[in-house]
Amino acid sequence: MNKIVSTTVAFTIMLALILPVSALAAPQSIPNGPWIEPNQEVQLNALMSNEELEKTLYQIEGRAKGRMTVEVSGYSTTGLPIFLVKFGEADPSKMRVLIEGQIHGGEPLGAEASVELIKQLAASGNKDIDMILNELSIWIVPRLNVEGAAYEVDGKLVQRRQNSQTWTPGEWGLPSTAPASWYYRSTPPPGYDINRDSNPDLNFVLSPANAALLPGASALPGFFVTPEARMMRNIYLEFQPDVFIDLHHRGTNLISAEDNSMCTLQIVAQVVRLGRTDYPLDPAVLAFSKQINAYVYLKLQEMGNSPFTGIQRYPDIDLPGTTLGSFTLNGSAIMLYEVRTARQKSNGMLTRQEIMGLMATLKGLADGSVDDVDPAIYDAIPPAGPSIGNPNLFDEF
């Protein structure tokens, strides 16, 4: 079984490899839904609340017959618990896979897919799942941004990208005039984009000695000022995963300028450009990342003419401050799931696509079939097509 050991020394980056989607709906000539209709109320109550997530995880653990454990791995700024599900320990004799969901509070399907994956791994007697759990240790954070997931306006759940945290320079020994990081939103309500708050240096601590790095920039590391990012850093250091998978949403893209079908999923194997001397990316780690992403692409293509085959390669990015960036610079192969944001329409189909891809990934890592994939297949995955917007809406998450 292919196990990557990076020659690079320490790095952390919090990804969320989700670039912000345009705030305005882009025009399009051929609307092809399912779009939210004019005057249709968007319902988010079908999504799990933080309380329901906690209850569900402990219920699954109670029926799992020792296959899994649930831990409170950390707390948000407002004291909300963040849960970590473990299938196995940090066993160096096994391949270790770390999965993160909902680092952006407004991108909920990663948590929904994570819980369904946990159910299948915990309860199924399927021989493939037995083989997966024999060969792999799997840790899952179903919902990292518990504050953004619970964000309400006038008593109505709307969810949002950021957490709910105020810039407190005194906490880091800095003067009150010190600028906040560039990914901090100061306008009420304040908060951070957690997926830009990681650093390739997993030991980084903001202090007067390095305060000149503030406010930073998108192509630079973050500062570990959010408890969520520090929690993921600590999990990473304990677990030392060989593979890290991050679950996100993005807007809507056409398959191509000639094909107005909608892309349902974008994937990515590289979030830091090769050739950087400050944050060098190990080519062997990149090659393994490409194999994993290409493997999932091929498996979903086997579904034939269906929505599950509308897959594209995520646009090129250079973001060492994301979790994906930080962890791949520290030697972990990575995969990004960016499913199309559809509000409540198509959520079931998109969640199912994530679950199928995740199960295929785990099986391919466990039986070694990922190792047989040519990394060059990843580079041949169609790039992102033209971005489009809902013609019935003027704003998007």
Image (spheres, rainbow, N blue to C red):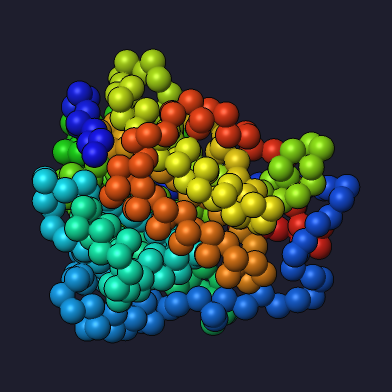
Can residue 361 be seen at all in this image of the molecule?
A: yes
Can residue 147 be seen at all in this image of the molecule?
A: no
Report the residue that reaches farthest toward the front.
127
Residue 13: quarter of image: top left
Q: Position of residue 278 (x, y in %)?
A: 30, 20
Residue at 34%, 81% (x, y): give it: 56
In this image, 346 relative to 245: left or right? right
Q: Position of residue 85 (x, y in %)?
A: 25, 66
The quadrant the C terminus occupies is bottom right
Report the residue that reaches farthest toward the right.
29
Of the pair 323 and 360, the residue shown nearer to us: 360
Q: Where is residue 46 in the image (x, y as percent from the top left)?
A: 54, 80
Residue at 19%, 58% (x, y): give it: 134
- Residue 57 to residue 97: above or below: below
Residue at 24%, 39% (x, y): give it: 1
Of the pair 64 and 27, the residue shown nearer to us: 64
In this image, 283 relative to 107: left or right? left
- Residue 69 to residue 17: above or below: below
In this image, 289 relative to 230: left or right? right
Number of numbered discs present?
A: 0
Residue at 23%, 78% (x, y): give it: 64
Q: Position of residue 353 (x, y in %)?
A: 53, 59
In this image, 134 relative to 287: left or right? left
